[in-house]
Image (tube, rainbow, N blue to C red):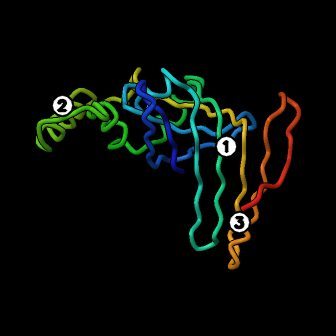
Amino acid sequence: MVISTVNSEMQPSSRTVYMKELLEEGIVFYTNYESQKGQEILSNPKVSVLFYWDCLERQIRINGVAEKAPEELADDYFSTRPRESQLGAWASAQSRAIKDRDALDKAFQEAEVRFEGKSVLRPPFWGGFLIRPSYFEFWQGRPNRLHDRICFNRVNEDEWDVHRKNP
């Protein structure tokens, strides 16, 4: 999915992330909390998400508020990741400038030594965000450009306003 965040200067930024879980409460993805997206979400939790399927001419837009997911969820998921990905979480100061590739490879090797013969624990700066949706838009393309746009806008915890928009 593509997630968009906004920094303190109100500059939007979008990137593709892996949606790991769909819970009743919302959508969960995992990242380094100290990364650009992590810091932007922590300072402004309003986010926008896009799922796009070009070959189907279909997309789903979601707006919502992100919050840290429970640590137990992050621990459970982290423990299932390949060991190299676990070590990579320790090695990468995600989104920060780095001298060169050798510096990243060295940090990875240091993580390998640190956890040699041991389980790799989840770093305290790595975890999940739960996005609680407040708006969904289901978009279906049509050859005549009269696309379908069906919208769900959260009114309260138990109620959604459903309406159609012009293309």
Q: Earlier in the sequence, mark 1 or mark 3?
A: 1
Amino acid of disc 3: Gln
Which residue carries the number 1 mark? 22
Residue at horizontal 58%, vertical 45%? 49
SS type, badge 1 = strand
Amino acid of disc 2: Glu
Amino acid of disc 1: Leu
Residue at horizontal 63%, vertical 29%? 65
SS type, badge 2 = helix
Mark 1: few/some/many CA within 10 Å (<14, 14-19, 20+)? few
| Cα–Cα span, label 3 and label 2 | 49 Å
Residue at horizontal 86%, vertical 41%? 161
Front residue of this view, candidates 10 and 56: 10
SS type, badge 3 = strand
| Cα–Cα span, label 1 and label 2 | 35 Å
Left or right: 153 as drawn, with respect to 106: right
Residue 53, position in %: x, y?
A: 59, 65
Q: Comparing marks 3 and 2, which lies closer to the viewer?
A: 3
Which residue carries the number 3 mark? 140
